[in-house]
Image (cartoon, rainbow, N blue to C red):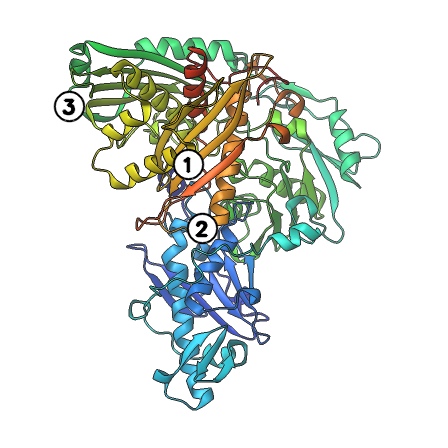
Amino acid sequence: MTQAVLAERGSFALDRRSFLRSGTAGLVVSFTVGFSGHEAIAGTGAMVGAYIQIDPSNVVTVYIGATEMGQGIMTGMAQLVAEELALDWTTVRTEHAPAAAAYANPLFHAQVTGGSTSMRGWFTPLRKAAAVAREMLLTQGATYLGQPRSNCTVKNSAVWCGSTSVPFGTIAADAAKLTAPDPSTVSLNTTLTVIGQRLPRTDIPDKVTGAATFGIDVRVPGMVYAAVQHCPTLGGTVQTMPSKPGGALAVVNLGNAVGVVANDTWTAMNLANGLKVTWAIPASSASIDSAAILAQAQTLMSSGTPQVIETSGDAVTALAGSTNKIDATYQLPFLAHACMEVLNCTASVTPTSCEIWAPTQAQGYCLATAQALTGLPATAITVHTTFLGGGLGRKIEQDYISQAIKISQAVGKPVKLTWSRTQDFQHDMYRPCSLIRVQAGLDASGNIASLVYRNVAPSISAQRSTTPGSNPEDTGAVAGATGLAYSIGARQIEFVPNPTSVPLGYWRSVGESYNTFAVESSIDQLAALAGQDPLAFRKTLLAGNTRALAVLDAVASISNWASPPPTGTARGLAFLIGFGSIIAEVAEVTKTSAGVVKVNKVYCAIDCGTAVNPDAIEAQMQGGVAHGLSATLWGQVTFAAGKANVTNFSNYRLLRRSEMPQVITKIVPSAGPIGGIGETAVPCVAPAVANAYAKLTGTRVSVLPFYPGSTMGGG
């Protein structure tokens, strides 16, 4: 998700002063980020921004505004604090912060986790906050030890003067009473001893023992359980409500769904599944049909009026004058999120309060949703963020949050709502499908003289616009196609919205997930047209970009690109500058005896600026490859007469453990700005595999997935 998209949603105010002060015996440093820049403004008891708590036992808790959904962000952020406070890592703890504007990501002032922006947003502010805490502790520690402050230093979670020390926990309460220094006067450590280390993740121990609380684990005294049956046809609403079935405590009209409340989740799901509801189906739902959507895209490709998102020179004229050119069309499907943890939310609404426990990527949006539904002030609403069994953009949405709140309002009790797997698949917010045409021409020297690029796709921005028909510019739809670092003589990047009633949402790497497939597949075709090696061709196009060239050289080295691959094997390359990072991937593929592609190895080279925790980066490369490969080989949602074809993993194929390729990662040392890693590995997988497959077989795959409708082949 792009910063612009997240910023559109806004931020939400919430005073959590009482939360921060209650039960806090030690030092609390909190801060905000000025709206004119990224500098941290520190002060005690300010109640904005993430904060650091030091208790008398010398345990340091870092409260994180971002959501931990398996990407390791809690650990990375804690390392920033540990670096500046010289903490003993064994004393560091992390917790999700409450919903408040104070904890908004500084990049876009909204408490949302997406776009691979958490570390990029908090890298400097969290270090500044820790540095401010360090200075306050030094001052108090020197007083405690009776020594000049200039003789003191911090290490191992204590203030030291020579061989004498005092733990932070002993002096934290008094240090909290000091006036915080201006953050602009505090310096950050230049010799890094914690940042860059492979430190163990703070969230893993509780996940291993089962002590960690995911949304689906929440238990609240006196709560009841709910499940939903949505209208099977998208766009439909309840026409007549069924009577309450035996065993149900209540049935609740949710507009496009009916909620069933029972004494346990299994009973609620079974009753919801068997409900006899009369639905009102609008005539427009019939147009939710994959064949019709594709046909409309093909018409718009040739005759639609485009939004010209980027232009440089006269690309159309330059294309006409090129003697060597390609004209390629790529087709990509709708995709589901398929999170391992189905959507769920626990809500407790009373006349004076609303409390929410949710696996959410968007605490700020939850707060706004609760305010809108209950009419309560923000100070009466509490959002508890749990761990997430996968987010992938789906858990930014508010449909499941609002349903839980409405059901709790209706029954007057705390309610835990859990969607069934079928409901989760058939009522997703799907990644848009896409039809992309790439026309490009080479000059006599084999350089790219022209690029005319058109993406026809449903627009997330247009669908969510508060002004219907305004057709807002949707730059996310061409992410990965605009701002290309390649040397291109003239370019014209266009977007044509393809209107649809299919509910759309943000999927891991969003626009880059389809545009990179088209761009990098085309680059390989242009390399072949120029008679050049795909790696050498890219290096020529990136001449002078030292960071990009270093990444390409790194992936060439670890993949042994210069040497022929084993017999029956081919390698394919793809490259991306996105999410603040630079990445290149090489996929090594063979064909099995059954004639399907098998991906044996994927080599990843990434420059993400400062590598805060190399283990986390490598894990995200592995996870991104698995995610991207599932989509490349099998991922597809189709629609007929307003209904999604997928119902479960039985017809939404994911990569199996035995099919996971070996992922070899090289983190390229860099002095560049901090980059994102959560989504970065996903977009290059499809073009790398397709480019390898084209070498191996002579067949260019331009329509994804490789195996539509398959539940068996590939890997």
Q: Which residue is mark 3?
A: 313
Image x and y of residue 615, in percent: 50, 48
Q: Depth-wise, is mark 3 or mark 2 nearer the camera? A: 3
280 w.r.t. 108: above or below: above
Residue found at x 44% / y 57%: 102
Q: Depth-wise, is mark 2 or mark 1 nearer the camera? A: 1
Identify the secondary structure beneath mark 3: loop
User: Which amino acid lies under the numbered mark 2 shown in the image of this protein?
Assistant: Phe
Q: Which residue is mark 2?
A: 12
**Residue 563 occupies which quadrant of the picture?**
top left
Of the image marks 3 and 1, the number of the one nearer the N terminus: 3
**Residue 35 occupies which quadrant of the picture?**
bottom left
Q: What separation in Å lies between label 2 and label 1 (alpha carbons)?
A: 46 Å
Q: Is residue 511 visible?
A: no
Q: Which residue is mark 1?
A: 558
User: Which amino acid lies under the numbered mark 3 shown in the image of this protein?
Assistant: Gly
**Most foreground residue, 696 or 324:** 696
689 w.r.t. 393: above or below: above
Q: Which mark is residue 236?
A: none
